[in-house]
Structures are given as C-alpha cells and as structure tokens.
Image: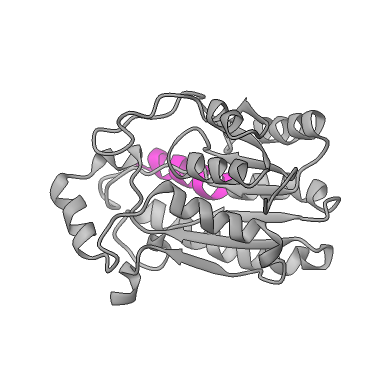
Amino acid sequence: MLLKDRISIVTGGSSGIGRGIALEFAREGANVVIADRRESPLQGKYHEKDTSTPTVQEIEKLGAQGTFIQSDVSDESQVTELVQQTVDHFGGVDIFVNNAGIHIPGGSQDISIAEWDKVVGVNLRGVFLTTKLTIPHLKKSKYGRIIQIASVHAYRGGAGPAYASAKAAVINMAKDTALEVGKFGITVNAISPGYIETAIQDYLTLEQIESSLEKTPMQRLGLPKDIGRAAVFFASDDAEWITGTSLLVDGGASAKT
C-alpha cells in the first residue's frame, strides 16, 4: 500500500473528484478526513445518478479509517477547527488535498459581484486558508504533501471570469508555496482535471457534454478515479522529489490547443 497509515484531509470529499481521491487514498491504506459542507453525496442528472452512500462508509468498506467533519473552507474559524479536529483524532496531518470548489456559470456581465466573491472565496481564499493553517502540522510529518486541485480552465478561458481566474491563481499558489516549504520536506503540486463525470456538470447540456467527448483523444470522459490515482502518485514516496508543478489529467484534450 502506497499510503499506509498516512493521515489525509480531502476537502469537498463527499462527492465527485474529492470522493474519488478519498477512495483511492483509502485503497492505498490512508486514513481520510472528509471535509465538506454536507455529508451526503450529490446526485446528478447526467453523472453520479446512483451515488448515495456517504464517502466515509465507502472508506471503511476498504478497510481504512474515515471521519466526516462539516466545514466551509472559505470560513477561517471552520478551517481552524477542521485541522485541529483532525490532529486531535488522528494525531497529525500528512496529506492535505484542496479539492473543494464551486462554479457559477456566466460571463462578466452575467454573474454578480457577490457571486464573484463567493466563487473566489471558496476556490482561492479557501485554498490559501487551508494551506496556511495546515503547514505547521505538515512540518511535523515525514510525508508532508499539499495537493491543489485546479482545472484545465486555469490555462484557458471559457469557464467564467471568477472560476478560471481562481484556478489559474491556485497553480501559481502551488508554485509559490512549494518554494516556501521545500526546506521542510513538504511537496506542493497541482492537478488540473479536464471533463470529469461528476454531478456538478448538471449545468451543461447533452450537446456540450458530447462536444467535450469529441475533443478528448482517449475517447472517453474522465472519472473521479482518474484524478484519484494522480493524487495518490503525488501523495506517495514516488513523488517525493516532485514539487511546484501542475499535472494535466484530461485524456489528452489539451494536447490539441
């Protein structure tokens, strides 16, 4: 097992990509804290239609330990409590995955300033908060890892001014933080997913989904497990000398651009 007995926190772990990461961590022997605003998984009209059991229940089926902590990553006091509860329960933190994110469709003339603040609050401010508050504990770990979940939209437009801008900033934050904490043996990397079959894709039309498939050389859409395996790599000893980078996991779609 690549992550046996390591203590991990996955934000937004109840559904979608976060759930996929959490389950792959558990499969590799890690103990996983699921941090999310709700414990029950989202169900979509296109994807994850039959997902119903809490992620912690699935983690335990795999023989690992899991616990759920309700948390809003844009709230400093809740993030502080999340980290402290994890340390109190498991004794420390080895891996932190910043996955929680939201998307509000629309261009600059469509979304309100309040909606901009909400997206950036979760997708960027939340990443800063969790990174800042977890580093003191990661310094004490022999396996300190921070994994930021960005997006292919960090490299191009098309997902709205708040989402794309925040995800681009997340990649730069990973690079900056990697420079800061490398001397402590902590690695910081980002994963940029392409189209992944999750419930949050409900805002798209079937035509848009088919267009995404047509643009993917691997001839299938991504699964949460695909991002989970990439996260396992960055969290494992195999990636102990890789830091400050971003990995595109999109079935080759970006190779055309």
Is residue 122 visible in the rendered image? The answer is yes
In the image, farthest residue toward the left: 207
Q: Is residue 131 left or right of residue 141?
A: left
Is 68 located above or below residue 171 in the figure? Answer: above
Give the magenta part as a residue range. Answer: 112-126
Percent position (x, y) of residue 77?
69, 31
Q: Is residue 65 left or right of residue 210?
A: right
Q: Is residue 35 left or right of residue 241?
A: left
* Nearer to us in this view, 165 or 205: 205
At x 24% / y 38%, what residue is drawn?
46
> Residue 99 in magenta?
no
In the image, farthest residue toward the right: 140
Image quadrant occupied by the C terminus: bottom left
Is 7 located above or below residue 177 in the figure? Answer: above
* Nearer to us in this view, 28 or 11: 28
Q: Identify the coloring.
A: one colour
Percent position (x, y) of residue 73?
58, 37
> Residue 117 in magenta?
yes
Q: Is residue 158 left or right of residue 192?
A: left
At x 73% / y 36%, what residue is drawn?
83
Percent position (x, y) of residue 179?
72, 69
Secondary structure character of the magenta stretch overall: helix
At x 61% / y 41%, what residue is drawn?
26
In which quadrant of the rendered view does residue 245 lie? bottom right
The total of numbered circles placed on residues is 0
Is residue 257 visible in the rendered image? The answer is no
In which quadrant of the rendered view does residue 181 lie? bottom right
Is 34 located above or below residue 144 in the figure? Answer: above
Percent position (x, y) of residue 79?
67, 35
* Nearer to us in this view, 242 or 174: 242
